[in-house]
Amino acid sequence: MASLLMEVPVLVAANTPMPMKKVEVSDPAPHEVRVKMAASGVCHSCLHAYDGSHETPMPMILGDEGAGVVESVGSAVTTLVPGDHVIISWLLNCGTCAQCLRGKPAYCYGPSPFGAIGFDNTGRFTDVETGKPVLHYGPATYAPYVVVPATSAIKIRKDMPLEKAALIGCSVTTGFGAVTNAAAARPGDSVAVVGCGGVGLNSIQGARVVGANPIIAIDTSDAALEMAVKLGATHTINPKKVDVEKEVFKIVPHGVDHAIGAVGSVPAFLNGMNILGPGGTLIILGAPGNGDKMTIDPIFHVLRGERGMRGSKYGSANPATEFPMLIELYMAGKLDLDSLLTASYSLDEATKAFEVLAKGGAGRGLIKF
């Protein structure tokens, strides 16, 4: 093995076009693998880093959703070999702590700090011109090659298209799992999804797959609502045109069983709480801005009707089992990934991809290598 050189868009300042820089990516350490990326999704989490709404150290390579082919493996890796197709999990979990062994890698006791990749708290990228480290946004899937722990490269069947598999790395798993894992929705439960971007649309799909009814999509974009119907929504509500609470209670007089807050907005979360029925739960997926606070009435929102609120990280999923399951659903025609892809970009168009994402619209953009 040998270190590789590549051209990568690097975040050096918020709301500033990302320059293409020559970066060296190192060999994998004993328990790591190096993956040649095929595609990476354009995610709102990375947009928050790009536009400065979330505090982010720099310089940094973005990207937390992607798929590719294993190029090389560390000396201690026994589960993967070069040529394996993998989806990259941004949960850089150790695989051996109590939480990992319980199938809860989101609670791993030993993940790397933000900006690093190895469990030795170091990185794998170096700026060739300056000789200084370049930080990782999770796995940094905007790089043509990434180095990640073997536990974060989930092997998949080779007949699964890698461009579609890339979406499973974050948005599909997060949205789908919020309904099936965190909310534990059952057939006939009512589900409202507040925010129908890439994650919310997959919450719609999760609700459809489990047999929920009705499935209410709430978004200010008519294009997003149209796609939500295509993916399984039975009703749509545009808050710019009608009162959300009144419309929901027309559809479900006693309120919904589950509300999914799939946009990083405190008013959206409050809408989700206000439309819950007795025993209902709001699942928060979206990340609001730094310092945003939410005020709830503990009697009205919680005690009366036993309503609840909880967060869901990565759809409360175990990627090692969830990724292959979602692929089987896709291959069986029960999970629609084709409709989600609405734009594609080359690597040097990463800044443009964020600008398009910031304007809203339906579906998911994809960077293709």
Image (spheres, grey):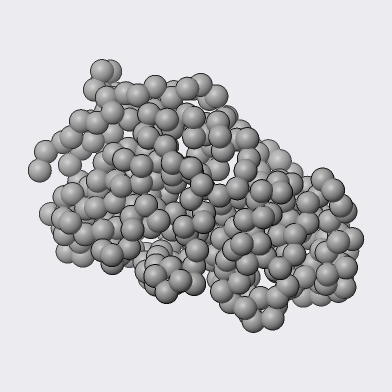
Residue 153 sits above or below residue 45 on the image: below
The reply, left or right, for residue 200 in relation to residue 339 is: right
- The residue under the point 78% across, 60% down is 273
Report the quarter where the N terminus lies: top left
Task: Residue 153: name its quadrant.
Answer: bottom left
Location of residue 338 in the rendering, given as x and y in whole percent from the top left corner: 47, 57
Q: Is residue 123 above or below residue 348?
A: below
In the rendered image, the residue lying farthest to the bottom is 187
Question: Which residue is most to the left?
Answer: 1
Q: In this image, 250 relative to 257: left or right?
A: right
Give whichever of 92, 258 is nearer the camera.
258
Q: Which image quarter: residue 368? A: top left
Q: Position of residue 146 (x, y in %)?
A: 28, 43
Which sits in the foreground, 199 or 267? 199
Which residue is painted at 28% across and 18% down in the image?
130
Q: Is residue 300 above or below residue 135?
A: below
- Residue 174: give x, y in percent of width and height: 53, 59
Q: Which residue shows up at 17% across the image and 64% down it?
A: 78
Visible residue check, residue 24: yes
Asked where in the image residue 19 lies, by quadrant, the reply is top left
Task: Compare residues 30 and 41 and report the one nearer the observer.
Answer: 41
Image point 47% across, 59% down: which residue? 337
The C terminus: image quadrant? top left
- Label count reads 0
In the image, taking residue 201 as reference, residue 235 lies left or right, namely right
Q: Position of residue 290 (x, y in %)?
A: 64, 37
Asked whether residue 113 appears in the rendered view, the answer is: no
